[in-house]
Amino acid sequence: MKKGNFLEYLQNNIVLFDGAMGTMIYKRGVYVNRCFDELNLSNPKLVQEVHSEYLRAGAVVLETNTFGANRFKLLSHGFLEDLDAINFQGACIAREVAGEYAWVAGSIGPLGIRLEPWGPTSYQEARDAFREQAQALLKGGVDLFIIETIPDLTEMEQAIKAVKELCALPIVAQMTIGEDGDSPYGSSPQKIARSLSDWGADVVGLNCSVGPQIMLEALEKMVKVTDKPLSVQPNAGLPRSVEGRNIYLASPEYMAEYARRFIQAGAKVIGGCCGTTPKYIKAMHSAVQSLIPHKRKIEIKIPAAEDLTCHTKPLKDRSRFAAKLAAGEFVTSVELVPPRGSDTQKALEVAAILKAAGVDAINLPEGPRALSRMGAPYLAKIIADKVGIEPVVHYTCRDRNLLGIISDMLGINAIGLHNLLLITGDPPKMGNLPDATAVFDVDSIGLVNVVHSLNCGVDLGGNPIGGATEYVIGVGVNPGAVDPDYELKRFRWKVEAGAEYAITQPVFDVQLLLDFLQRIEDIRIPIIAGIWPLVSLRNAEFMNNEVPGAHVPDEIMDRMRKARSKQEALETGLEIARESIRQIHAHVEGVQVSMPFGKVEYPLEVLKVLKEL
């Protein structure tokens, strides 16, 4: 076959892509910790041999060996400076093998990082990364692009836009799905098909992660909601770990049988992903030849557009704490660190004292400084039931994966706890269990987005959960951050993701806070200022040097040094805290006062200043 226009050929034919590049490279003895993409430069002959085997097996599209050749993944291997060369050479190698008898598809895989609002990478940064890779592939002479194994629709959108900004070459866009048939972020096959079609992909489909049976079921759902050509490139079944290696057990014959089923279900592009080799592609080629190519004649019934409007419960109706924020009243909270053990008696006594003093809420941190303590939600429930004061529950993305986060959020809402402070969490290395593993499936921005989605009554994929949660979404912010522009950018993302109030790191330099408040006027949400009563010079030194995000100005350090006794140092620290509240009272919506060494009298002494105001 001599190739012509790819999309014209696709109208009346089934197109067979090649199989796994990584599987073949690994079979040739290259360890998995190597950068396979860099082999385009250091061992081009090996890459050429793999392409040649797939061409002989019957593939009419060869994918470049550039799946992970983006700036983020190459940086981790130390090859960032070679990005252009790796992609350009990858296209040239495939181009030489394909000749005039196969098309070359520039392979673009996921960036390997999380995009806003799930992570710190902005849409523009992601699009720039995709664009620079696509530009190098374009220079190398690719005929089309295949954007594959993308887990997140947001990331796929940026990749498609990046390619379209460069050229008009065809785009095959393939998401990855799990055993439940949905993407890792919960998007259904129907939503995937509609979204990829709307964004202008020429072929829409699925690849990787699962075997042919699950992909067939997903394909049958996709074919009903798009008239774009569909592609399917499954793994050779689900992998099984044998002596530490992932072994794919589906045979070439099994894959060939499913190739027929894919075509009969409406697929126009088929191929193989992890675990597939030229033997699999040869068997699938025979299956393609055994079927008479035909155009699909199906009735496309596009479901009614999904209602994407978020209808959350009014803020004032979610909790007493939220009602005061909504009304513009000044709120007070005191931070109470959960116990190291399971005895809650002292915490209950402190909570009762704070309630009697008129404090609005108790703030319960989750593993502060990465020390193992009772979980904040559990103590919060006990305090709410036995004392009656409202808790603000800290929740970190350090300790749980996405499944755990969603499970927790549904459960915490069900037991009647609604005030949240969503934070990243201190790194385990600084705590008492330094070998513990931090999870960080999402960062604090992503965590806000997760909870906001649940408040809208849907999960991450936009699927209804049968009733919205009622959380009051709080976030942390550090006005004295080393990089204030970056802190401002992240705060903006948190607000855009759904944050409804923020609590600052301890404020010692009032001017820093006031300057920060000016910079966030256009995205202003209620700000609760963190107040830490210093009790000694040693305490001030500790805050300045060992507490992440805290900074004690020289002026205050000098005042603490001048104290001639422990009592004078304590009185000086309490007065500094009261001075801070006096200066910021008119500019913030509340204060959160910490409780150094568990002494409840310290925050109560500080809060007495509010009677003056």
Image (cartoon, rainbow, N blue to C red):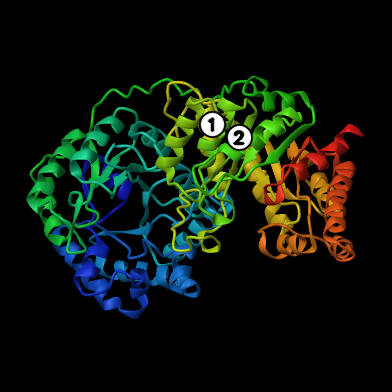
* Picture quadrant of residue 53: bottom left
| Residue at left offset 50%, top offset 36% | 378
Q: Which residue is mark 2?
A: 348
As rendered, which of 73 and 259 lies closer to the eye?
A: 73
Q: Which residue is painted at 50% across and 23% down in the image?
A: 468
In the visual, does 32 lie left or right of 364? left
Q: Residues within 10 Å of mark 2 (few under 14, many from 20)?
A: some
Q: In the rendered view, does 331 fall on the left or right side of 498?
A: right
Q: Is residue 390 above or below residue 485?
A: above
Secondary element type, mark 1: helix
Camera-nearest residue between 492 and 274: 492
Q: Earlier in the sequence, mark 1 or mark 2?
A: 2
Left or right: residue 228 compared with residue 373: left
Quarter containing the C terminus: top right
Amino acid carrying mark 2 in the image:
Leu
Tell me whether circle 1 and circle 2 mark residues in contact (CB < 8 Å).
yes
Answer whether residue 200 is visible to the viewer in this image.
Answer: no
* Distance between mark 1 and mark 2 Cα atoms: 8 Å
Q: Pointer 1: what residue?
A: 382
Q: Position of residue 42 (x, y in %)?
A: 34, 80
Q: Amino acid at mark 1?
A: Ile
Vertical comparison of 473 with 104: above or below: above
